[in-house]
Amino acid sequence: MNNSNRNLAVLVALLCSLCCVWADVPLQYYNSVNGKKKAELKKAFYNVISPHTRIGYSGLWAAYEKVDYLENTNEQGQHQVMDYYSDEVYYFKGNGSAVDGMNKEHVAPQSWWGGGTSIAVGNDLIQVIPSDSKANNAKGNYPLGVVKGTPSYPSNPSLNSRMKTGRNANGEMVFEPCDEYKGDFARIYFYVATCYSDVNWENRNDVNVSFIKEDYPTLKSDILPILLQWSRQDPVCEWEKTRNERAYGIQGNRNPFIDFPYLAEYIWGDSVDYAFDLYTTFTGIPDGEEEQPVFEVSPENVIFAAVPGEASEPKQVTVRMENTKDKTFTAQVDGPFELSDDPDADDEDWSKTMMLLGSPIGSSFFVRLSAQDEGSYQGAITFSTKGVKDIVVSLSAVVGGQDLEPFFEDFGKGSKSSYAAATVECSAATWLLNDALIAKDANTNGTPSVRLKGSGVLEMQTDKLGGCDYLWFYAGNYGNDTGVTLQVSYSLDAGRTWTEVATLQSFDGWQRYGFAIQQPGSIRLRFQGGGVASKRLNIDDIEMSHYDDETGIAEINNSYETYKSYESYGTYDLAGRRVTAPHKPGIYIINGKKVLVR
């Protein structure tokens, strides 16, 4: 597909999507709810979602295989089961049968009504989901809530990070999911309250049931503030949208609180006095009382490194829009840079302009440097939408063969005397120091070094161009402290994601450590302490050699006179050990570059 055809296709898809809030939401399905408020709105959604295909309790495992699978597979090609309740990993068998160690778990507990699993709420695919059996037993029939004090489950927090049970501030037993899934559970409760308001919800003495048999509000007053807060703090995620779409294909109904993330505000929350508009409701803020528009782009600048004649690795850019006059934005790039919504797109499918549908949770695409000769390049992306000022993101790139400065950080320039979090500009980079300071210690080389305390962090806030072949640094205990660890990681996307290089478990004096990174592009480092909370360690003299392939290795003859001038820089083998002249034939790092000694 050429660029003009691709842009036309993007525009057509965009125009089609303007009639809906989320691209996959079939608005004709919800057409009857438009213009309604509060209890009437809830009843309208009930009329939409209540009619659906009954799978039956015995058919749920076969349905789960089509709805709750993750892309991860085991050696047999079986897909991992998505589980909100446990860190355990389970795989579907592929034949529709139950997974050993898992249960079919009712988010709204089965004991809260009188009909067991034979009635619709008891076998609804949206509210009955796979769960680790141990976690399911611990959850029991407790309502959602916030655990105060020591949890009753798990007894050891390291055994399960996805949920806990215990007593809330009123002394009632509750089930609290982890922060990542609190919004997911809130939206399932909203669905149950909307789809099953006519169920015979019981008034039990042993547990506080969250629902009442009535058309409105159905949810009790003590649970509603918690659910609304969780839904706001944990917005709809991609997994929820994926599962909603899959369940719709099997059961024939949807969870509207996923399709319209602010719907709960119109039924129970801060917008109950305003009519719900199916076509314009993005934020839950009614017309006439709109908040200020939000138009944000991250990152604020993008730096590339590439080899001559090849396009750079793509980098992601995210745009967040909220309360804007238009629902779309355009991104236009200049210079030798190009855009695509697919990082793996063919060369002909990258373009100079894109038009995309905005989103309050962020819309992302990719930018790269096209294939160029050696040199330095500059450019920018201009972002535009109606009613707000354009945003310009600067782009810069270095293509092979550039005389990059060696990266060597000795922290001699920076100054920081407290453990409070702050950024410090040092010799080679700007660093974030949190629970860390810069000071001298007799155990080091006598010059200032970074001292980390507990789980303190030393993290680059600026990129090193030219990638990294090898990393070296000095580290050791501060004073007589022991029991500390140090995790070393790198990032190739300006600190959004990190790859671990190594974790050092113990230190025996002041030593130099070396690791192979061997990554092109722009790179950042992060050093994070661990182990005993009150103990400290020192880090200093961080050095990175530039990434290069074999064609970029300089050659020198194996004679003392030839490389005598190099000695002032320090010469290291590929394991990070310093060596002295004369050298045996081989590849060495001199002045941050590979040198082949003949």
Image (spheres, rainbow, N blue to C red):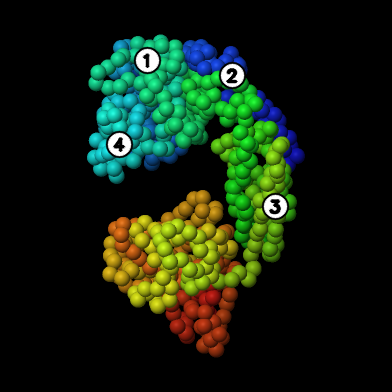
SS under mark 2: loop
Residue type for callout 4: Lys
Quick check: marks 1 and 2 in contact, CB under 8 Å?
Answer: no
Extreme residue in the right direction? 4
| Residue at 57% from the left image edge and 15% from the top image edge | 36
| Residue at 48% from the left image edge and 73% from the top image edge | 412
Whichever of labels 1 and 2 marks the residue nearer the N terminus, that label is: 1
| Residue at 30% from the left image edge and 59% from the top image edge | 534
The image's mark for residue 380 is 3
- Say which residue label 2 marks: 275
In the rendered image, residue 347, in percent from the top left (x then y), is placed at 67, 47
Q: Nearer the viewer, residue 512 or 149?
A: 149
Q: Separation of disc 1 and disc 2 at Cα?
A: 25 Å
121 over 12 or under it: above or below: above
Counting other residues with Cα less than 10 Å from the Cα at mark 4, is it few (<14), some (14-19), or many (20 or more)? some
Whichever of labels 1 and 4 marks the residue nearer the N terminus, that label is: 4
Q: Separation of disc 4 and disc 3 at Cα?
A: 50 Å
Q: Separation of disc 3 and disc 1 at Cα?
A: 57 Å
Residue type for callout 1: Ile
- Say which residue label 1 marks: 212
109 over 576 or under it: above or below: above
SS under mark 1: loop
Whichever of labels 4 and 2 marks the residue nearer the N terminus, that label is: 4
Residue type for callout 3: Ala
- Say which residue label 4 marks: 148
Counting other residues with Cα less than 10 Å from the Cα at mark 1, is it few (<14), some (14-19), or many (20 or more)? some
